[in-house]
Image (spheres, rainbow, N blue to C red):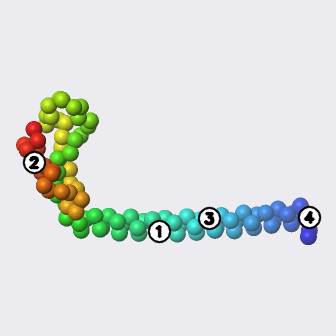
């Protein structure tokens, strides 16, 4: 084991460069995996059929009449909507 200061600096420099290379490679692999997963997830949502449902834009206090500013139409996955208990037009709610 050498205690020469130049040798110690050289080894520390090599260790630093190797560590940075490994960190960069790990970051690239992580970014690539997340990007691919996100693209697949987005593609699966696009393929799924969507329906428009009426949703509250903000908190609706009890006893206050619902007006057009308090609700809006939003697209939801058809598989998550029970059409028997939801409204699909604003006129049905307001």
How far apart are the alpha carbons under marks 2 and 4?
A: 80 Å
Which one is earlier in the sequence, the residue at label 2 or at label 1? 1
- The secondary element bearing badge 1 is classed as helix
In the image shown, does 31 or 85 lie closer to the viewer? 85
The residue nearer to you, when weighing 62 against 75, is 62
- Which residue is denoted by mark 2 in the rendering? 89
| Image position, residue 80 (x, y; %) | 24, 59
Residue 28's x, y, as percent? 53, 67
Q: Which mark's residue is nearer the viewer, 3 or 4?
A: 3
Q: Which of marks 2 and 4 is nearer the N terminus?
A: 4
Packing grade of label 1 (10 A; few <14, some 14-19, many >=20) is few
- Does the CB distance between marks 3 and 4 fall below 8 Å? no
SS class of the residue under badge 3? helix
- Badge 4 or badge 1: first in the primary sequence: 4
Query: Which of the two discs, 2 and 4, sits closer to the camera?
Result: 2
Look at the image and tell me in which quarter the N terminus lies. Answer: bottom right
Q: Nearer the viewer, mark 2 or mark 1?
A: 2
The kind of secondary structure element at disc 2 is loop
Question: In this figure, which residue is indicated by the disc labeled 4?
Answer: 4
**Is disc 4 placed on a helix, strand or loop?**
loop
Q: Earlier in the sequence, mark 3 or mark 1?
A: 3
First reached walking from the N terminus: tag 3 or tag 2:
3
Q: Are marks 3 and 2 in contact (CB under 8 Å)?
A: no
Where does label 3 land, which residue?
23
């Amino acid at each position: 084991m050498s205690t020469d200061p130049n040798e110690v600096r050289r080894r520390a420099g090599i260790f630093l460069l190797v560590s940075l290379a490994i960190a960069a490679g790990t970051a690239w692999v992580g970014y690539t995996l997340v990007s691919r997963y996100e693209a697949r997830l987005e593609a699966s949502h696009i393929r799924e059929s969507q329906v428009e449902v009426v949703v509250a834009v903000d908190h609706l206090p009890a006893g206050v009449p619902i007006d057009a500013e308090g609700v809006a139409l939003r697209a939801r996955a058809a598989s998550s909507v029970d059409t028997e208990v939801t409204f699909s037009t604003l006129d049905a709610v307001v």
